[in-house]
Image (cartoon, rainbow, N blue to C red):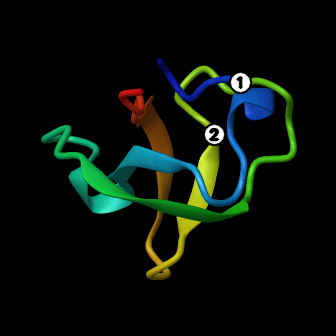
Amino acid sequence: MHGRNRADIYPGLEVDIILKKDQRSGKLTRGVVKDLLTSATYHSRGIKVRLEDGQVGRVANIVEEDF
């Protein structure tokens, strides 16, 4: 699932983000959402979040949990 809708993202969710420095390469960083930084309900490049380890980037994918 893509991270373009703010309603799909919440603290504690595991996501893959693209850091500003990795935008050209598209390298993904996995982590757990601490804060949502984008106030808009939708963003075409992904909702900007802060991970629990302090890294900031735009959500590329929401990690699906296997049940």
Looking at the rendered structure, the kind of residue marked 1 is Asn
Q: Position of residue 48 (x, y in %)?
A: 61, 49
Mark sitting on residue 54? none
Quarter assignment of residue 20: bottom left
Judged from the image, the secondary structure of the residue bearing numbered disc 2 is loop
In the image, what residue occupies the spot 85% across and 35% down?
40
Task: Judge by depth and name the residue closer to the eye, 56 or 11.
Answer: 11
In the image, what residue occupies the spot 76% across and 33% down?
6
Graded by Cα atoms within 10 Å as few (under 14), some (14 to 19) or many (20 or more), the crowding at tag 1 reads some
Q: Are marks 2 and 1 in contact (CB under 8 Å)?
A: yes
Q: Position of residue 52 (x, y in %)?
A: 52, 76
Judged from the image, the secondary structure of the residue bearing numbered disc 1 is loop
Nearest to N terminus: mark 2 or mark 1: 1
Quarter assignment of residue 9: top right
Residue ID for mark 1: 5
Quarter assignment of residue 35: bottom right
Query: Along the horizontal axis of the image, is 35 left or right of 32?
Result: right
